[in-house]
């Protein structure tokens, strides 16, 4: 049965054996993404095949898109379907290894070139080539691995044993039916002049999801091959892509990790490429993030060889900057310096990603960490932080950032441009008001940084151990105040004005039990010594014989003063 996909592309229902036997060699492009299928995919595939085998019906396993290489003798490039084809070939290898039947050798022609000593028919991508070779050549690998190519083989080995046991005839018939009889795949052959990238993207936009990073990589190296040759493309890939994004499992995990950004969830790789596109000026204010890969493809299409190489260099530069940005965790040791504070604020407010292009420029331009560099961070810090604690939303994809980059590219002087575009900062009086009715989250953050500032003597870099962000926020005059604190207030409104201002809050090493929380100051003060640790911000409380309206308001004023010494408008 023929299926016409478009005027110059023909698709045909085929068996696995027909697809692999008609080609002398099947090549997965070296730059294709790593093998991604997992136990959920394997289970679904195996269950479909077993069910179809038992019911005597043909399953549909998807499409394989191939493009015969010009000037080659029956060698084809796998444009799409490498995950599917890899999985099926590993399932077949697991069956071959477990079937005791003299005719099983016929199946080896599906995996190995004829008239060779087990020369593998499918040439895998650079990332997975070694692992795939180990599986097909019965080399030693971890039999307990549960992910990737090794995990795939181990999974099918176990499932075959569970499903068939020692029934050799049924195992053989299953292999014969699935791989030689069922026309369960659609093979699509492209003409030599067909744009495989367009077909690849079209198929994947409706099927297996590719990240924008995957599509950008495919477009880049497809264009580089066309501008140069595959040998040079592989060298560039190794230096500027593989060593950055795919060097090992840790790197791949880092770039594949998803982050919530506003209403969207994106991988770190996609966040990086969005930021680069903003820096390069190829992502405009009117552009939509869903079109990021298309924006890159249009840009890449226009580049010549030298421009492509320079673009790769820039990608590597910005990727290394992003990779080395602090990711603050609560149990890390925090020291008092402006960069640590900025990235902690970004985590606190969840607005780091829109400012990433600006961070890239600052990190690239100010390698010597000049005063202007520090002022830029302070300005962004105050803009983000003050708006956050005053309840003013900062858009996850702030168009101001795109305008800042555009102004910078034409005018230079990044600090002045930042100051012009980030001018909507709440006034000091507006910020002061917050401290008299402050959220627990904001109070905890502010008290922590005031304590760090005291600890480090207001110096940026000093040999101190630092603090972990692991404290509990405590209202000294408690929310349940009526029984033991009625001398401080005559009504709920009066009490709330004292309870929820910053002067009435402390950072403790653990949470007090409810009985202690609601005790009088005299009893509570005795317990505080067990919980305050070495924090000066708490030790000063123990000197107070009483805790009343005057003490709370005096402490609030003192903390507000220290707050504005750290986040100082006058330094902008």
Image: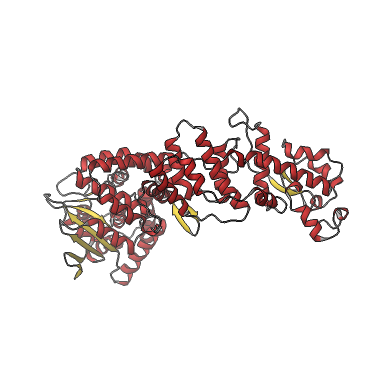
The residue at the point 69 percent across, 47 percent down is 472
**Vertical placement of 441 versus 316: above or below?**
below
Q: Is residue 91 visible?
A: yes
Q: Is residue 510 left or right of residue 238?
A: right
Pinpoint residue 207: horizontal percent, then vertical percent: 33, 63
Residues 43 and 294: in front is 294
Pinpoint residue 81: horizontal percent, then vertical percent: 28, 57
Q: Is residue 508 visible?
A: no
Figure quadrant of the C terminus: top right
Quadrant of residue 183 within the rendered picture? bottom left
Q: Is residue 251 left or right of residue 555?
A: left
Quadrant of residue 319 within the rendered picture? top left
Residue pushed farthest right? 487
**Vertical placement of 170 versus 344: above or below?**
below
Pinpoint residue 99: horizontal percent, then vertical percent: 29, 55
Residues 224 and 393: in front is 393
Pinpoint residue 541: horizontal percent, then vertical percent: 79, 40
The residue at the point 77 percent across, 43 percent down is 555
Figure quadrant of the N terminus: bottom left
Q: How many marks?
A: 0
């Amino acid at each position: 049965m023929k299926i016409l996909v478009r005027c110059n592309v023909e698709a045909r229902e085929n068996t696995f054996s027909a697809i692999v036997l008609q080609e002398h060699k099947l090549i997965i492009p070296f730059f294709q993404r790593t093998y991604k299928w997992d136990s959920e995919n394997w289970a679904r595939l195996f269950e479909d095949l077993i069910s179809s085998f038992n019911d005597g019906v043909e399953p549909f396993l998807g499409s394989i898109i191939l493009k015969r290489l010009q000037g080659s003798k029956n060698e084809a490039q796998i444009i799409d379907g490498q995950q599917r084809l890899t999985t099926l070939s590993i399932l077949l290898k697991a069956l071959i290894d477990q079937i005791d039947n003299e005719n099983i050798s016929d199946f080896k022609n599906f995996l190995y070139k004829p008239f060779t000593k087990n020369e593998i028919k499918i040439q895998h991508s650079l990332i997975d080539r070694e692992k795939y070779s180990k599986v097909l050549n019965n080399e030693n690998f971890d039999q307990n691995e549960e992910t990737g190519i090794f995990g795939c083989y181990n999974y099918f080995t176990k499932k075959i044993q569970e499903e068939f046991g020692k029934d050799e005839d049924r195992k053989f018939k299953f292999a014969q039916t699935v791989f030689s009889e069922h026309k369960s795949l659609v093979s699509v052959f492209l003409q030599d002049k067909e744009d495989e990238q367009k077909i690849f993207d079209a198929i994947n936009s409706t099927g297996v999801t590719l990240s924008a990073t995957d599509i950008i990589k495919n477009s880049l190296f497809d264009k580089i091959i066309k501008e140069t040759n595959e040998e040079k493309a592989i060298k560039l890939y190794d230096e500027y892509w593989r060593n950055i994004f795919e060097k090992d499992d840790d790197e791949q995990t880092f770039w594949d990790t998803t982050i919530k950004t506003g209403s969207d969830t994106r991988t770190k790789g996609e966040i990086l490429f969005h930021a680069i596109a903003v820096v390069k000026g190829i992502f405009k204010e009117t552009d939509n993030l869903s079109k990021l890969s298309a924006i890159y493809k249009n840009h890449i299409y226009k580049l010549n060889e030298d421009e492509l190489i320079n673009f790769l260099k820039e990608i590597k530069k910005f990727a290394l900057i992003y990779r080395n940005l602090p990711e603050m965790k609560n149990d890390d040791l925090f020291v008092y310096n402006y960069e640590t504070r900025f990235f902690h604020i970004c985590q606190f407010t969840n607005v780091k990603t829109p400012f990433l292009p600006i961070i890239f420029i600052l990190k690239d331009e100010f390698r010597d960490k000049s005063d202007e560099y520090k002022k830029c961070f302070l300005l962004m810090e105050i803009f983000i932080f003050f708006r956050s604690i005053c309840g003013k939303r900062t858009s996850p994809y702030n168009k101001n950032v795109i305008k800042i980059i555009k102004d910078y590219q034409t005018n230079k002087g990044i600090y002045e441009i930042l100051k012009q575009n980030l001018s909507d900062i709440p006034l000091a009086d507006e910020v002061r008001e917050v401290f008299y009715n402050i959220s627990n989250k904001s109070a905890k953050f502010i008290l922590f940084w005031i304590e760090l500032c005291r600890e480090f003597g207001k110096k940026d870099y000093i040999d101190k151990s630092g603090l972990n962000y692991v404290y509990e926020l405590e209202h000294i005059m408690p929310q349940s105040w009526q029984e033991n604190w009625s001398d401080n207030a005559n009504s709920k409104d009066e009490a709330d004005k004292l309870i929820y201002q910053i002067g009435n809050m402390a950072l403790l090493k653990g949470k007090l039990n409810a009985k202690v929380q609601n005790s009088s100051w005299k009893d509570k003060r005795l317990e505080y010594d067990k919980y305050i640790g070495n924090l000066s911000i708490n030790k000063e409380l123990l000197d107070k014989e009483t805790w009343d309206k005057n003490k709370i308001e005096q402490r609030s004023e003192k903390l507000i003063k220290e707050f504005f010494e750290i986040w100082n408008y006058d330094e902008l």
